[in-house]
Amino acid sequence: MKKELRRDPNNKIIAGVCSGIAKYLDTDPVIIRLIWAAAIFLFGTGFLFYIIC
């Protein structure tokens, strides 16, 4: 089965981007959300990447 990187409308908080990435990587969405939050606060680029995704 081919994996597709898509937003997950069933498990979303803002737009479903993090949950879609977590589903693609077969991991917990909380881990992906923590990585995004760290990227936003530490590097300042996380928000830009979130909007692009």
Image: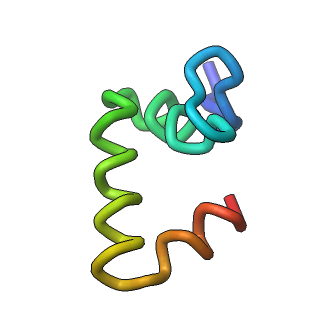
Residue pictured at 36% horizontal, 45% vertical:
32
Q: How many marks?
A: 0
- Reply above or below: 46 against 5: below
Residue 3, picture quadrant: top right
Percent coordinates x, y for residue 49 in the rendering: 59, 70
Q: How is the image coloured?
A: rainbow
Left or right of 40? Residue 35 is left
The front one of 41 and 33 is 41
Instruction: Locate residue 14, reporting x and y percent.
Output: 63, 39
Most foreground residue, 51 or 28: 51
- Compared across the picture, whether 15 is left or right of 50 comes to right
Q: Is residue 17 above or below residue 26?
A: below
Q: Residue at x 56, y 32 (%)?
A: 13
Residue 11, position as x, y percentages in the image: 56, 20
Q: Residue at x 70, y 22 (%)?
A: 9
Residue 11, above or below 5? above
Relative to the observer, which residue lies in front, 5 or 28?
28
Q: Quadrant of residue 37?
A: bottom left
Residue found 68% across the figure and 58% down from its top: 53
Give how far across and how far down residue 15 sits, in percent: 68, 40
Quarter the N terminus occupies: top right
Question: To which quarter of the image does residue 40 belong?
Answer: bottom left
